[in-house]
Image: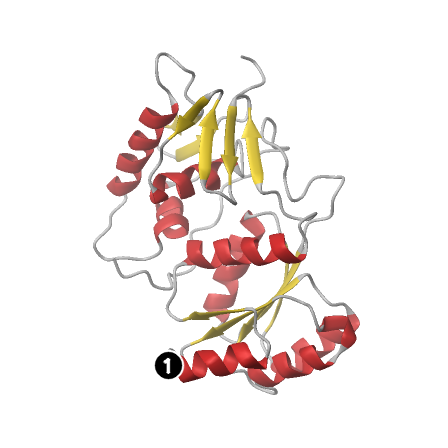
Amino acid sequence: MNNQIISVPDPRPAAASEPRGVSPRPNSAAVAPPRILVVEDEAALSLLLSYNLEAEGFIVERVERGDEAELRLVESPPDLVILDWMLPGVSGLEICRRMRARDATRSLPVIMLTARGDESERVRGLSIGADDYIVKPFSVPELMARVRALLRRARPDRVAALLTAGDLALDRENWRVSRGDRNVHLGPTEFRLLEYLMGKPGRVFSRAQLLDSIWGFSAEIDERTVDVHVGRLRKALSQGGERDPIRTIRGAGYSFDETFGKND
């Protein structure tokens, strides 16, 4: 499957007033959500990254020029930087080098985005101080997973590794799902689908939005694929009359039931 950068998603549906039933959340009142600086001069890609990061509960700042990024990093260092290699003003490679030379940003996690896929270029980016390196075009779910992994290592207090709702638990770090005393065996796609829905309880996602966020763009996949994988997920989660935590909203899409675990 050819995972590629996708077009900017449709306008997001209205969010639930306050997610209930799933904890912990990165944007809980007790802990401020991580701040991520996106430094990318392609407007459509920058908007796409911002949309998906905000959907994960992060605070996002966007700049298009390397010199603007330099100012932001000096004034108010974020928790993580997504940094394009080729930028107007100052290159991403030079920004990364300068970050590693300053005490305030020396240990700040950096994911480098680039169209340069050669091994020598990857080595160059990592040797200059980038923590991770991802080549365009890329899968959005893969990038989100890398963001969470870096934040968990750098700021474990800011990103939840475990999502729970009632007797259902999803362990992001070990890729495990359980329901009560039973292990739930999911394929990679079903795991990502559950993680995405469970992380935003009550919020309704259209099939197109789920297709964009979970699979990325592929000409070989249509919206019926979402229904197939939701069906597999439901079968794995609900056995022997167990309550189904996934809601189908006719004509709109799917959501994780925000009352799950509350009224059982």
Residue shown at 54%/82% (left/top)? 87
Residue shown at 26%/36% (left/top)? 228
The kind of secondary structure element at disc 1 is loop
Horizontal and vertical percent position of residue 22 = 58, 30
Q: How many marks?
A: 1
Q: Which quarter of the image is occupied by the N terminus?
A: bottom left
Q: Which residue is mark 1?
A: 118
Residue shown at 50%/70% (left/top)? 43
Q: Is residue 62 above or below residue 56?
A: below
The chosen color scheme is secondary structure
- Left or right of residue 28: residue 195: left
Horizontal and vertical percent position of residue 80 = 63, 63
- Left or right of residue 49: residue 17: right
Horizontal and vertical percent position of residue 60 = 63, 59
Q: How many other residues sit within 10 Å of disc 1, few (<14), some (14-19) or many (≥20)? A: few
Q: Is residue 233 above or below residue 1?
A: above
User: Is residue 100 visible to the viewer in this orientation of the structure?
Assistant: yes
Which of 129/225 is in front?
129
Amino acid under disc 1 = Asp
